[in-house]
Amino acid sequence: MKGSYILVAELKESKKIRVGKLGLINFKEGYYAYVGSGMKNLEKRIERHLRINKRTHWHVDYLLKHARIKDIWILKSEERRECKIARALSEELSSIEGLGSSDCGCISHLFFSATPRDIEELVRKQGCCRYGFEGIF
């Protein structure tokens, strides 16, 4: 399967997290939506994010060392749609500048919300559906 995904992770307390070359970033307590894509194998990309022990590779990996994935949304597509989804989320949610968007022209691919409901409403409007996964948390 090919397409885009949105990870929704909860950070239970505010903290400063070092994110690779971006340095220390202040993350507020709340929910973060990370938009990515898996154009070769979407399921494998999601499985990688769900693993506890993994090499820190993407910006979101640094956050996921401290936050727990609570929900996953997908949009099956033969074309890359992650930037379109990220732009839609950026119109309604605050973002962490430069995070997850080093390979495109977007300001960010990571967005903050105090509640998961706001994220859910926005990703549903983009045509995304909930991805069933066996919660390991």
Image (tube, rainbow, N blue to C red):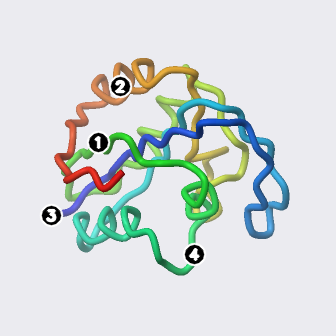
Q: Which amino acid does label 3 sit on?
A: Met
Nearer to the camera, 75 or 66: 66
Q: Which of pointers 3 and 2 lies earlier in the amino acid sequence?
A: 3
Nearer to the camera, 68 or 26: 68
Decide: marks 2, 1 in contact (CB < 8 A)? Answer: yes
Q: Which of pointers 1 and 3 lies earlier in the amino acid sequence?
A: 3
Which residue, given by chain and number where applicable, does mark 4 sit on? 57
Q: What residue type is labelled 2?
A: Glu
Q: What residue type is labelled 1?
A: Trp
x 52%, y 35%: residue: 87
Q: Residue furthest right?
A: 24
Label 3 – label 4 distance at C-alpha: 22 Å
Decide: marks 4, 2 in contact (CB < 8 A)? Answer: no
Foreground label between 1 and 3 = 1
Q: Which mark is on residue 73?
A: 1
x 31%, y 30%: residue: 126
Q: Which residue lies furthest to the bottom in this view?
A: 55
Which residue, given by chain and number where applicable, does mark 3 sit on? 1
Q: Which amino acid does label 4 sit on?
A: His
Label 3 – label 2 distance at C-alpha: 22 Å
Q: Which mark is on residue 120?
A: 2
In the rendered image, residue 115, in percent from the top left (x then y), is placed at 50, 21
Q: Which mark is on residue 36?
A: none
